[in-house]
Image (cartoon, rainbow, N blue to C red):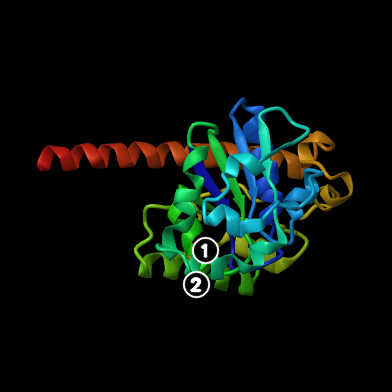
């Protein structure tokens, strides 16, 4: 099971659109997919037409009085399930902080999912907190949508520094440009010549498009109603790149483990 978190310190950069659309594309590939709406705002739940409510809230899940499998809902799409948001997620940091292992609280909660899904996409709230550290702990990769503006690049730089400072190198960092408006000179400049420090592993960028904004009206993944739009094609290319990055990282990790065995 691969866990991919759609994450950014900054809000309004396209995290939910990323989780929903890539989750849908992964399911179209035939993979068993779960989208976990961890944001108390519940946007991903809204897009999938599921009420953002968990009976008993997050506390019962973290205390393991209820399994995640019990609260998962089906969606309108084959192979694609949703773990809906709950407003109690706003207290998630406090709940984790009172646990025995505050930085690893989500890991034990997610264990029952292991044999049920190929991919779990986590739609995260914008923050850098104890919840974030738990997300980093359980994730194979962080998908980081980044608008090509000064402030958005600054938050990405902060995330890169945080990851290195705390030794979180096991989780892949996969930033990409989102909401790109090529009519704006700053957007064009940054996309064509990104800062060297950022060295984006993902080359595909998601354009700013009205079709993406209409997800809130259609309450559906983009490809289901605008399959040939520039944005839909971009999300398909993004998913192809993400899969390639995951495969390369897995291969590198495997060879590193073999080398360590040979020298031990």
Task: Name the mark on residue 184.
Answer: none
Q: Nearer the viewer, residue 111 or 183?
A: 111
Residue 223 vertical position relative to residue 63 in the rendered view, above or below: above
Rendered residue at 18%/40% (across/down): 259
Pointer 2 local density, CA inside 10 Å: few below 14, some 14–19, many at least 20: few
Q: Position of residue 109 (x, y in %)?
A: 50, 49
Q: Secondary structure at mark 2?
A: helix
Q: Nearer the viewer, mark 1 or mark 2?
A: 1
Q: Nearer the viewer, residue 165 or 248?
A: 165
Rendered residue at 65%/69% (across/down): 149
* Mark 1 vs 2, N-terminal side: 1
In the picture of the structure, the residue carrying the numbered disc 1 is 132
Residue 174 vertical position relative to residue 74 in the rendered view, above or below: below
Pointer 1 local density, CA inside 10 Å: few below 14, some 14–19, many at least 20: some
Q: Distance between the Cα atoms at labels 1 and 2?
A: 13 Å
Q: Secondary structure at mark 1?
A: helix
Rendered residue at 63%/66% (across/down): 126
Rendered residue at 67%/37% (across/down): 81
Q: Residue furthest top?
A: 30
Left or right of 16? Residue 245 is: left
Q: Nearer the viewer, residue 226 or 29?
A: 29
Q: On the image, which quarter does residue 35 sit in?
A: top right
In the picture of the structure, the residue carrying the numbered disc 2 is 158
Q: Residue furthest right?
A: 217
Q: Position of residue 52 (x, y in %)?
A: 76, 53
Left or right of 197? Residue 189 is: right
The answer to whether residue 54 is visible is yes
The answer to whether residue 175 is visible is no
Quarter holding the C terminus? top left
Q: Are marks 1 and 2 in contact (CB under 8 Å)?
A: no
């Amino acid at each position: 099971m691969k866990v991919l978190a759609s994450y950014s310190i900054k809000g309004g950069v396209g995290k939910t659109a990323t989780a929903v659309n890539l989750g849908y594309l992964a399911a179209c590939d035939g993979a068993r997919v779960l989208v976990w709406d961890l944001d108390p705002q519940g946007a991903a739940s809204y897009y999938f037409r599921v009420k953002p409510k968990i009976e008993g809230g997050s506390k019962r899940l973290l205390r393991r009085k209820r399994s995640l499998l019990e609260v998962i809902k089906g969606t309108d799409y084959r192979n694609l399930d949703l773990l809906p948001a709950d407003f109690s997620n706003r207290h998630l940091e406090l709940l984790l902080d009172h646990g025995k292992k505050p930085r690893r609280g989500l890991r034990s909660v997610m264990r029952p999912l292991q044999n049920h899904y190929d991919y779990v996409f986590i739609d995260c709230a914008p923050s850098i907190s104890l919840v974030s550290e738990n997300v980093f702990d359980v994730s194979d990769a962080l998908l980081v949508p980044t608008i090509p503006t000064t402030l958005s690049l600054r938050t990405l730089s902060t995330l890169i520094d945080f990851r290195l400072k705390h030794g979180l190198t096991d989780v892949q960092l996969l930033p990409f440009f989102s909401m790109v408006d090529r009519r704006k000179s700053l957007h064009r400049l940054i996309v064509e010549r990104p800062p060297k420090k950022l060295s984006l592993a993902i080359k595909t960028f998601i354009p700013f498009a009205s079709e993406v904004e209409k997800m809130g009206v259609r309450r559906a993944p983009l490809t289901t109603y605008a399959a040939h739009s520039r944005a839909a094609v971009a999300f398909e290319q993004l998913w192809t790149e993400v899969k390639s990055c995951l495969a390369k990282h897995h291969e590198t990790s495997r060879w590193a483990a073999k080398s360590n065995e040979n020298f031990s």
